[in-house]
């Protein structure tokens, strides 16, 4: 019998929250619904969901603040932000905090469900992946850690997946549009800016080994040279 996946929805618009809950329950998910950030945090602590869908603008505690608190306790749980915001800095902030996906309102339930399933599939792949050597670094994809000698760095979910795809295509160009669609869901301008931020972060975390470079191949994508 297939495992029933528990999902926490935090949405202060009662009608939208109920529509999301009912739509997911028809797909055999167990859904917990909160209408503010404080209630969502309590449900997160008591119900142990496998994935979070958080509205950014909520009373008592907004989605970004809630995600920051949860990321201090759990670096791996997938987080999808729901928001009416569309400014580049908001999108980048959401991913920088540790969000895994970002869905702008209005959206279709089918799109949300596809994104949820994609994230859950990535988690399954992550658990089955092996530890990888990158130059002088040890990359533990399942644990999302990058180790150099005594230095152990914790990666975010998105950093780990981006690095994993760079390693899989080592010394080859990783197509920019393809990886944006795979990890961000869309290759639009906002997501492109967000990916550039994550590439910069990975370069800093790999800086202790001079033999490792992440090269920007203009017009095509990125290449991990090692």
Image (tube, grey):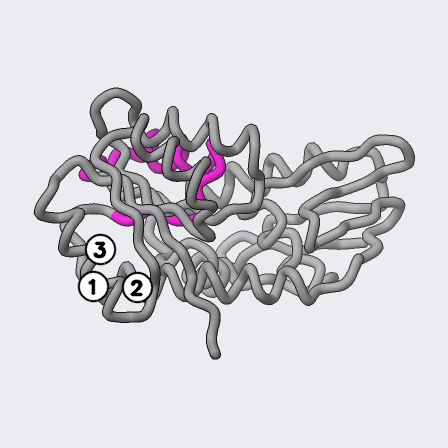
Q: Judge left or right: residue 117 versus residue 123.
A: left
- Secondary element at image label 2: helix
Residue 75, by quadrant, is top right
* Mark 3 or 2, nearer chain start: 3
> Residue 21 — which label?
3
Judge by depth and name the residue closer to the eye, 91 or 203: 91
Q: Is residue 133 above or below residue 113?
A: above
- Secondary element at image label 1: helix
Q: Which label sits in the foreground, 1 or 2? A: 1
Q: Which residue is mark 1?
A: 23
Q: Is residue 16 magenta?
A: no
Question: Which residue extends farthest top?
Answer: 60
Q: Is residue 62 above or below residue 177?
A: above
> Residue 113 — which label?
2
Q: Are marks 1 and 2 in contact (CB under 8 Å)?
A: yes
Q: Is residue 89 magenta?
A: yes
Q: Judge left or right: residue 10 versus residue 84.
A: right
Q: Are marks 3 and 2 in contact (CB under 8 Å)?
A: no
Question: Badge 2: few (under 14), some or many (20 or more) residues near its Cα, within 10 Å?
Answer: some
Q: Are marks 3 and 1 in contact (CB under 8 Å)?
A: yes
Residue lying at 55% horizontally and 59% vertically, measured from the top left: 123
Q: Please report the bounds of the magenta region as a residue range.
A: 84-103
Tell me the CA gap for discs 3 and 1.
6 Å
Judge by depth and name the residue closer to the eye, 14 or 172: 14
Tell me the CA gap for discs 1 and 2.
9 Å
Residue lying at 47% horizontally and 69% vertically, measured from the top left: 3
Residue lying at 22% horizontally and 40% vertically, measured from the top left: 11
* Residue 163, image x, y percentages: 65, 52
């Amino acid at each position: 019998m297939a495992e029933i996946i528990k999902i926490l929805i935090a949405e202060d618009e009662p009608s939208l929250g109920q529509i999301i809950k009912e739509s997911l329950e028809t797909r055999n998910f167990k859904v917990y619904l909160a209408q503010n950030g404080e209630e969502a945090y309590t449900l997160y602590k008591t119900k142990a969901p496998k994935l979070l869908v958080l509205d950014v603008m909520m009373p008592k505690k907004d989605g970004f603040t809630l995600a920051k608190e949860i990321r201090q306790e759990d670096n791996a749980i997938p987080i999808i932000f729901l928001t009416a915001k569309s400014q580049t800095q908001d999108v980048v902030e959401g991913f920088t905090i540790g969000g895994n996906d970002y869905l702008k309102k209005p959206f279709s339930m089918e799109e949300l469900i596809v994104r949820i399933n994609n994230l859950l599939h990535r988690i399954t792949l992550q658990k089955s992946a092996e530890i990888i050597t990158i130059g002088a670094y040890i990359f533990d994809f399942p644990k999302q850690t990058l180790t150099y000698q005594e230095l152990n760095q914790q990666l975010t979910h998105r950093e780990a997946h981006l690095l994993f795809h760079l390693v899989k295509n080592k010394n080859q160009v990783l197509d920019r549009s393809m990886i944006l669609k795979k990890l961000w869901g869309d290759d639009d301008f906002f997501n492109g800016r967000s990916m550039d931020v994550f590439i910069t972060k990975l370069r800093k975390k790999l800086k202790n080994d001079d033999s490792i470079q992440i090269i920007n191949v203009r017009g095509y994508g990125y290449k991990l040279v090692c």
